[in-house]
Image: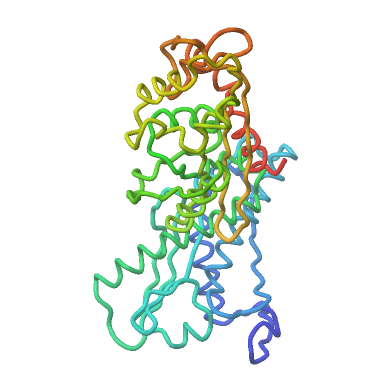
Amino acid sequence: MLPGSTSSRKKRDGVKRDSRSVEISRLIGRSLRQAIDLYAIGENTITIDCDVLQADGGTRTASISGGFVALCLCVSRMMEEGIISASPILRQVAAISCGIVDGKIVLDLDYFLDSNAYTDANIVGDNLGNIIEVQATGEREPFSRKELTMLLDAAEFGVRVVQSRQQLALKDKLAQLNIKPSIVIASSNANKKRELKNILGKNYNIISPDEIGFNKEIVEDGSTFSENAVIKAETLCRKTGYPSIGDDSGLMVHALNGAPGVYSARYAGDMHDDGKNNIKLLQDMQGIENRRAKFVCAAALSFPQEETKVFTGEVFGEIGLAPAGENGFGYDPLFVLPDGKTMAQINSSEKNAISHRAIAMKKLEASLKGE
């Protein structure tokens, strides 16, 4: 730690370091070595220098998390200069401090919390939910196996949050380094997940809520597609710690004053029945000559402790007189594109190139890359 980084002035370590500095540096080294294939960097040595500017608890975990970003930037530079030909990064590594203070689990302990904790721990993990290292101590009394499990669960959440910050710092370097961040989508709909995997799956690991044990229904009570998308993304991000995508999409028919709109999925009731929704739409459109319509998608991207961003996409067409096509879902069989085909008469690759969701997601992906 730098002089002045602690409340009582500390001398900077010279050649001879104190035992605490040695112990911390060994922890950092052990953790970061798990992130990289050492054989792949050949006869090169990478030195990570961690200077703590303001020590207020959690210094070793902050050094590991920041050290990983520095390691990635170094590897990126080595690749650009031709020192190595491929990324040796094996996994994303981050760390978080946690403890039990006044009977409550607390993350990212500052000095006050750390000095009053009955139990404190430092947890290092990777982007797959694996544990790299655990340092846990009963400061005032022993702790139970149940309490250790609670600490590990909280730390897993905290590591996800820290990793999302690492991803924001690295942005355009992620693909180069073969780091495939996980993003949770606020839907367990198999069709929607398949579409998003086709659009974003090359560079991102797309996860549905049920895959990480989140089964609670998110109430979509917004009056617009954008409001509902934000509600879903922010709720999921807050509950899981993962960067999250919430999207809300639907059909807006000009002659019906924008209906079905946000009620597209339950236009014929609360059963989310595509067939009944299509029948009701055809009934409501009987005798109407102006059949102009558009598909709209609002996609919200939420990172922990970041302002949520919203991206929109629209596709224009008309409502057909009868369903046509076997592909797609929802109102696709009734939505006639300018070329005369319905959305259900084109294949998935064609749809993913022109759909309202694809347009919104491409804008979202550009933001993820920092473009």
Place of residue 355 in the rendered image (x, y in percent of width and height, measured from the top left): 57, 24
- Nearest the viewer among 361 and 8 is 361
From the viewer's perspective, is residue 239 above or below residue 10? above
Q: How many labels does the image show?
A: 0
Place of residue 260 in the rendered image (x, y in percent of width and height, measured from the top left): 49, 32
Place of residue 273 in the rendered image (x, y in percent of width and height, measured from the top left): 34, 28
> Which quarter shows the C terminus?
top right
At a point 59% along the width and 23% down the height, the residue shown is 293
Q: Is residue 136 left or right of residue 332?
A: left
From the viewer's perspective, is residue 289 above or below residue 234? above
Task: Examine the image and state in which quarter residue 106 appears.
Answer: bottom left
Q: Which colour scheme is used?
A: rainbow
Name of the residue lying farthest toward the left: 145
Place of residue 335 in the rendered image (x, y in percent of width and height, measured from the top left): 52, 17
Q: Is residue 119 left or right of residue 84?
A: left
- Nearest the viewer among 243 and 295 is 295
Name of the residue lying farthest toward the front: 287
Judge whether residue 292 can be spotted in this image. Answer: yes
Judge whether residue 38 can be spotted in this image. Answer: no
